[in-house]
Amino acid sequence: MRIAKLAAASLLSRKSNAVLTLMAIAISVMLLLGVERVSQETRSGFANTISGTDLIVGARSGSVNLLLYSVFHIGNPTNNITWNTYQHWANNSQVAWSVPIALGDSVRGFPVVATEPAFFEHFRYAQQQPLEFAEGQAFQRREAVIGAEVARQLSLQVGSNLIIAHGTGSISFHEHDDHPMQIAGVLERTGTPVDQAIYIGLRDLDMMHGGTDDHAHDEHEGHEHTGHEHNEDDHHEHEHQNHNTHQHHEHEGSSQVAEPPIPGISAFFVGLQSKPRAIFMQREINTYREEPLTAIMPGSTLHELWRTLSGFERALSVVSGFVLLAGLLGMLATILASLRERRREMAVLRSIGAGPGTIFTLLVSETMVLTLAGMAVGVGLLYGFIFALAPWIQSSFGIVVELSGISNAEWLRLAVVFVAGFLISLIPAWRAYRNSLSDGLSMRV
């Protein structure tokens, strides 16, 4: 206790140097923990991008490539899947639900995803979290649903019109201005690529690329007038084209048969009746002879993709480790530089009965006080920055950083800082011990 009071009094007598050293340690600790916190949240957000989907199926391709373009909207599919192939698997007895998607267009750099309204019912993220609407509802004919980030950056809302452009670049030289879309709904923020996507109907995408409007109108009438009987002529017209038709099993068991809304799709999401059957279903799809397909389990592929990106995480950790080392070395340099000035102080302490061991303990105590105080201030700075910058980080990078307790990995890093501070403290303490032995009661100048 006496040593602790003496160390505190000594530091107070050198407030400027002590504060600068403390802040160097605090900033180093904040960066070290900040990298770990952002890495944890990024890893968690990465794994939570899609949930509840058992399989993603696309044309023959690499698993990571399929995941990137179907979920993250990065890159392009190697080929399309025919509608007949999609229907073959959608009607499989093992499939509980399926949702097709078609890609290739954009709005000012934001990807356009053509799909069915069932997408908003079945797609899940995080821990089985459903998509919710901040305003509006799912699209119908000539309507679109936009993610939260699209709404924010393009200043769009329900009722606004938008023109979809061909291609996925931020600058397009061909716009589908003859087929304007009206926004029907805006999704709640999810922290996933959904926030940066625009969703339209498959029939609308086909129309933009030269499809006829007759079948689209038929389907539109069938959906908007649910419960009304179809015209008998329409029924017979659809019957003789049965080899190109599909059944909408998602719409409450409806037996309506309609023309394919689009000739081909980019991929489709699958939910199975029994999740343990996913591995067997994956094998069946991958060996399908009628058309080359690739089926992936998104969870395992996400982990595989994260492993390819983990090098960047390690690089950031190494950089933050060197920042911490620089802070500790700065503290060491400051204390060593002050020892020459403090030799008279040490001589006075010796004169009042302090032994070399006491001097050694005093220097270790001072260094550890600075280290512990720096760690505490660093943790405080980390939480302060998270509180202030979390909304900006989420809107700019899609990473949700929460004010949660210190994790085990962060405690481990703090322990490393504590041990490193202790080891660093031994150097000036040993120097002071040697000086006190050689100086005795009369300080050498």
Image (cartoon, rainbow, N blue to C red):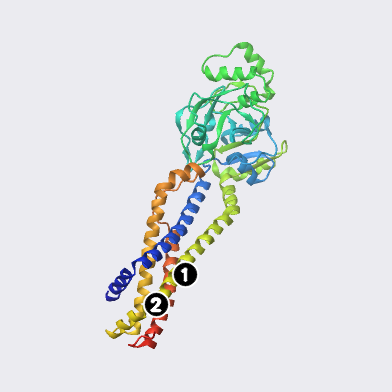
288 or 195, which lies in front?
195
Image quadrant in which the C terminus is located? bottom left
Amino acid at circle 2: Leu
Q: Count the marks: how many?
A: 2
Q: Which residue is mark 1?
A: 329
Q: Percent x, y for residue 354?
A: 30, 83
Whole-percent x and y of residue 416? Answer: 45, 66
Instruction: Name which residue type carries label 1.
Output: Leu
Task: Residue 127: tell me if it is visible.
Answer: no
Residue 195 higher or lower than 32, as above or below: above
Q: CA distance from mark 2 to mark 1?
A: 15 Å
Q: Position of residue 385 (x, y in %)?
A: 41, 51
Residue bearing mark 2: 339
On residue 229, the disc is: none
Residue at 56% across, 41% down: 54
Residue 178, percent from left and from top? 63, 21
Image quadrant where one finds the N terminus = bottom left
The residue depicted at 58 percent of the width and 37 percent of the height is: 270
Q: Residue furthest front?
A: 445
